[in-house]
Amino acid sequence: MTFAHEVRAQHVRYEGPIFTVLTDEVTMPGGGTAHRDMITHVGAVGVAAVDDAGRIVLVRQYRHPLRRRMWELPAGLRDVDGEDLAVAAGRELVEETDHRAGRWDLLLDLHTSPGFSNETIRLFLARDVSPVPAAERHERHDEEADMDVAWFPLDEAVAMVLRGEVTNGPAVAGILAAARAYESGFADLRPADAPGPS
């Protein structure tokens, strides 16, 4: 008996430090097999940092595949072995915005492009935000060297999404979820260490 979606063979097309490109031969429900190209990815974390005034911090940086700069949430790869995901998110917040947070909750888990990639990003809601002292700030390099950092009222950030000014998927989801969480008084958030999606 043949089971649907069983991987019969796998061919590595490219292998790099962040992602690997594969072609799988997969059994199909109607019989036979099909080839499916996919990307396996190390994963990422992101931060929706909201201050006491109901503002969210966004960063604008250059994204080479699109050849332009985009407004996004502070975010980064899960590329440190064994690092707690909330700790990784806190590190990214410090490095990209010169701010740290005293409270962390889980906001969302996202599969960014499940049609061709297994990439997941865990988005945290950060509160009790304060600036990092100037002497302790991270020196930014590469695309981050000319990164813009700005605080927006949540209503304005939502409007930016709806006007098409924010199109980065995790940023869109994080902004909308953070605005909903803020409106509900942060009542329905999961703890930062909640289990991930199965």
Image (cartoon, rainbow, N blue to C red):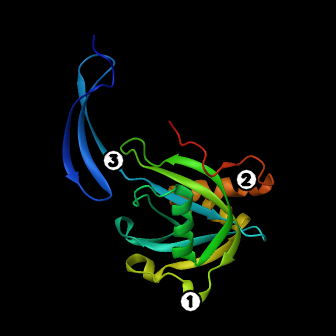
Q: Amino acid at mark 2?
A: Arg
Q: Which numbered marker is on residue 135?
A: 1
Specify the label residue 55 is tagged with: none
Residue 80: x and y, percent?
41, 61
- The amino acid at mark 3 is Thr
Q: Considering only order in the chain, which callout, 3 or 1, is on the residue closer to the N terminus?
A: 3
Q: In the shown orientation, is residue 100 left or right of residue 180? A: left
Relative to 167, does residue 108 appear above or below in the rendering? above
Q: Which mark is residue 180?
A: 2
Marks 1 and 3, how far apart at CA: 38 Å
The residue at the point 57 percent across, 66 percent down is 90
Residue reaching furthest to the bottom: 135
Q: CA distance from mark 3 to mark 2?
A: 31 Å
Residue 36 sits in quarter? top left
| Viewer-proximal residue among 135 and 8 | 135
Vertical order, 84 against 196 (above or below): below
Asked which secondary structure carries label 3, the reply is strand
Which disc number belongs to residue 40? 3
